[in-house]
Image: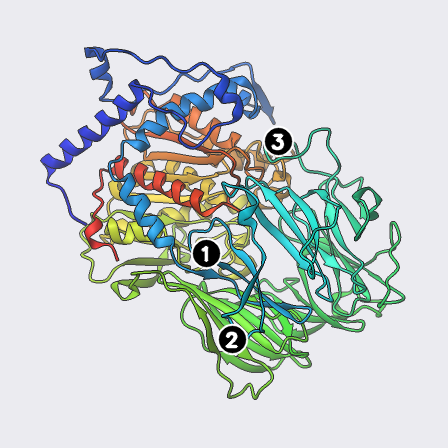
């Protein structure tokens, strides 16, 4: 990175702020990200015709819009009174909220546009994305399919391999979601082929919402049947072996069509069977739980077609397991409210049913195995509910976590293990669980495995790392596996990217309580560590999710053009070391996540990678909670905070859409005094510090169709930040970016990803006074 002299730095910073405030005063096109349609009917801000001395004085500081406080909203939690003055922002479609959005855009948009490097950043990002990306191939009905994105397409296109797996030159476009909308707002989110490969059920979502509309397509003539299935969210699609229909789950009808902008609680999920060629109103109800409104149902047909397995989730993790055995597996009789027999109750473990041989079922579970194991269960045994009757097939590894498993080529178990957040792959025998072969893979993370059908003779898997885009490999399973070696199937090669210019290190740091926490660090090779490098520290720490090395095109702006450092901390709450690691960062141990992350930040400063003024922290969703909580707890440690779709009002998170399923992760502040006091101590909205001299420049990112972490979290948070700190720290940007026709992140088109990151880098460069150097681009 080319460093400015102090004099030039000051001059550059003043110019940027003058440009920003001139844009603000002249009211130039306030809506950059798009705004709700109601917003266009609101009166525009007036444009002064002259700039007087008072205006010039205002150029020295941010003037945040006034946000109304309703101090009558006070709740009593176990005798503690908690004010909620911005609760009116929970009505995301009211005129008052829309006016709030416009006023926030009037601050944010000009500030982002004042970055003189925006055009260069956009051009660089488009170049970085201009390379082919793809999935592993998968097989149905004798045909292979593969998803491919040529580079700047908004969404991957599903192709069919015309001449089989050995000829990638002949591809037929089977389904292209890019033709469904001009702006990429409609995306493919779920899909399932019938057993014979003649029918394809697929779900479309609009504007990034979690809601799906399900269609059914004839594979032969590429036309859709008339029926449309709606009110679907977080559902499996599992076909019966006769190819006549499938099981799926849906929510009750609403007087208003769900579109992702509503905040109402999602409850009373039901499991149905849909027979192709019929209306949704004729679907057969299989089961539901009217007395347990939080239950969600997943119907899964066994490989042989003779069993229907029903998994019931009440939270974000563990489940109960029931089953129904069809008398005729080849022509199963589907009836309303079918009898379901229990296998595992109590919501104390998870179950991934891999395959079966008649009544013998092979299951990946964490039941009394925090690192997971594979067990064999006989469903004809009257004592199958007793765990003592289960047989351990693949024992729990003492250190490594068995993240997933699948069965291929009749009796080969493909086991994906994670060791210190890095993948390894084993082949084991389904009969006795013994190791057949460990597959050598480059250091990184397995991104995808494709071999989940027992008649598959090929194993495909893809690998990625910080410095390696997707590379897919093929292992032929119908040969001598002791000598067989994987062969490169397909490789992504971004134009001009040279991984040899950079280096990745895995380090281990001590957290506040002495726990060893993995930290990945990536930067240019031979980079001088002078405590002055702009450094992004990323974290998540929740829901048993593994933070693994993976390639992200947008990261190259930081590493290359800003000559910076990227760091990722695998903190507690994640799944890097199994369920114990997860439990040590959830519920009444959530503070461990924050302590781990703070320790990682302090390590980067102590080891001269950066200094607080140049340390950028970033996280999304649960990671948004993370970065805002630590910003409140250690405001002097960070220079900039990027909070994407963050969970920020922790006293009310469970009252909107699917949030009630996260009580197992955070606890219920309404029904437990202990949880209330614990959550209240870290909830970002309720802990913005007062009377401080420094707080990181903060950009909150949210979206109008985010129906997972609803945007009201970010609305209330930015209002609280600006009202508490706006006058104390008038030169610290505290802003919100509100995207439209966009959701929590899934299904986001490439163009939106690029524009979002143009804005993020513009904010970082402006706020930290960084220099963008295009000469050192890879």
Q: Nearer the viewer, residue 93 or 122?
A: 122
Which residue matches tag 3?
262
Q: List x then y, in percent, for residue 665.
A: 58, 46
Q: List x then y, in percent, for residue 307.
A: 80, 64
3D distance between C-alphas at marks 2 and 3: 44 Å
Mark with earlier residue (2, 3): 3
Q: Residue at x 51, y 32 (%)?
A: 713
Q: Nearer the viewer, mark 1 or mark 3?
A: 3
Which residue matches tag 1?
547
| Quarter of image, res 653 | top right
Q: Residues within 10 Å of mark 3 (few under 14, many from 20)?
A: some
Above or below residue 67? Residue 767 is below
3D distance between C-alphas at marks 2 and 1: 25 Å
Quadrant holding the C terminus: bottom left
Q: Residues within 10 Å of mark 2 (few under 14, many from 20)?
A: some
Q: Residues within 10 Å of mark 1 (few under 14, many from 20)?
A: many
Which residue matches tag 2?
474
């Amino acid at each position: 990175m080319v460093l400015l002299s102090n004099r030039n730095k000051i001059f550059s910073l003043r110019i940027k702020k003058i440009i920003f405030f001139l844009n603000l005063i002249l009211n130039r096109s306030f809506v950059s990200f798009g705004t709700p349609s109601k917003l266009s009917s609101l009166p525009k801000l007036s444009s002064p015709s002259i700039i007087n001395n008072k205006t010039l004085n205002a150029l020295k500081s941010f003037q945040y819009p006034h946000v109304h406080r309703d101090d009558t909203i006070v709740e009593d939690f176990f005798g503690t009174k908690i004010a909620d003055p911005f609760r009116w922002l929970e009505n995301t479609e009211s005129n008052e909220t829309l006016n709030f959005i416009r006023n926030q855009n009037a601050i944010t948009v000009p500030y982002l546009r004042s970055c003189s490097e925006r055009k260069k950043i956009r051009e660089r990002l488009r170049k970085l994305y201009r390379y082919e990306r793809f999935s592993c191939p998968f097989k149905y009905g004798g045909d292979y399919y593969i998803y491919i994105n040529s580079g700047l397409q908004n969404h991957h296109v599903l192709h069919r391999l015309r001449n089989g797996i050995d000829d990638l030159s002949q591809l037929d476009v089977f389904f292209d979601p890019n033709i469904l909308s001009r702006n990429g707002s409609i995306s493919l989110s779920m899909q399932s082929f019938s057993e014979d490969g003649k029918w394809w059920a697929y779900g479309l979502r609009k504007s990034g919402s979690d809601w799906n509309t399900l269609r059914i397509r004839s594979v032969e003539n590429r036309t859709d049947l008339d029926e449309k299935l709606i009110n679907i969210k977080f559902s499996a699609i599992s076909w019966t072996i006769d190819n006549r229909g499938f099981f799926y789950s849906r929510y009750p009808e609403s007087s208003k069509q769900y579109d992702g902008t509503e905040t109402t609680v999602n409850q009373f999920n039901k499991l149905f069977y849909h027979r192709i060629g019929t209306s949704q109103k004729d679907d057969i109800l299989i089961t539901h739980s009217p007395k347990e409104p939080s239950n969600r149902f997943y119907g899964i047909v066994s490989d042989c077609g003779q069993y229907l397995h029903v998994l019931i989730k009440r939270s974000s993790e563990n489940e109960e397991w029931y089953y129904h055995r069809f008398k005729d597996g080849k022509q199963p009789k589907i009836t309303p409210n079918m009898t379901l027999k229990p296998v595992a109750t109590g919501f104390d473990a998870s179950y991934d049913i891999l395959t079966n041989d008649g009544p013998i079922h092979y299951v990946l579970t964490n039941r009394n195995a925090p690192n997971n194991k594979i067990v064999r269960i006989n469903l004809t045994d009257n004592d199958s509910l007793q765990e003592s009757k289960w047989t351990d097939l693949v024992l729990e590894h003492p250190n490594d976590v068995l993240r997933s498993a699948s069965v291929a080529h009749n009796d080969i178990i493909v086991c994906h293990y994670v060791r210190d957040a890095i993948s390894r792959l084993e082949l084991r025998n389904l009969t006795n669980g013994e190791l057949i072969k460990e597959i050598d893979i480059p250091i990184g993370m397995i991104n995808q495995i494709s071999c989940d059908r027992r008649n598959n003779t090929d194993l495909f898997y893809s690998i990625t790392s910080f410095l390696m885009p997707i590379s897919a490999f093929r292992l032929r399973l119908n040969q001598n596996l002791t000598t067989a070696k994987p062969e490169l199937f397909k490789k992504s090669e971004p134009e001009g990217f040279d991984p040899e210019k950079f280096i990745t290190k895995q380090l281990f740091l001590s957290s506040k309580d002495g726990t060893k926490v993995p930290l990945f660090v990536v930067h240019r090779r031979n980079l001088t560590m002078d405590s002055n490098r702009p450094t992004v520290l990323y974290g998540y720490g929740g829901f048993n999710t593994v933070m693994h090395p993976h390639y992200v095109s947008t990261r190259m702006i930081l590493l290359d053009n800003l000559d910076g450092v990227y760091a990722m901390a695998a903190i507690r709450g994640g799944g890097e070391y199994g369920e114990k690691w997860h439990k040590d960062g959830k519920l009444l141990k959530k503070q461990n996540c924050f302590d781990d992350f703070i320790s990682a930040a302090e390590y980067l400063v102590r080891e001269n990678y950066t200094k607080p003024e140049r340390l950028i922290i970033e996280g999304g969703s649960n990671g948004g909670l993370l970065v805002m909580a630590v910003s409140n707890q250690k405001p002097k440690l960070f220079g900039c905070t990027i909070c994407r779709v963050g969970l920020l009002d922790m006293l009310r998170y469970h009252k909107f859409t699917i949030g009630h399923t996260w009580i197992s992760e955070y606890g219920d502040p309404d029904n437990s005094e202990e949880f209330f006091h614990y959550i209240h101590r870290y909830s970002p909205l309720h802990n913005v510090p007062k009377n401080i001299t420094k707080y990181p420049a903060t950009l909150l990112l949210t979206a109008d169709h985010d129906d997972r972490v609803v945007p009201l979290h970010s609305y209330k948070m930015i209002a609280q930040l600006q009202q508490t700190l706006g006058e104390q720290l008038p030169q610290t940007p505290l802003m919100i970016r509100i995207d439209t026709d966009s959701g929590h992140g899934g299904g986001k088109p490439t163009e939106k990803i690029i524009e979002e990151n143009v804005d993020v880098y513009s904010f970082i460069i402006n706020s930290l006074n960084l220099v963008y150097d295009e000469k050192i681009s890879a």
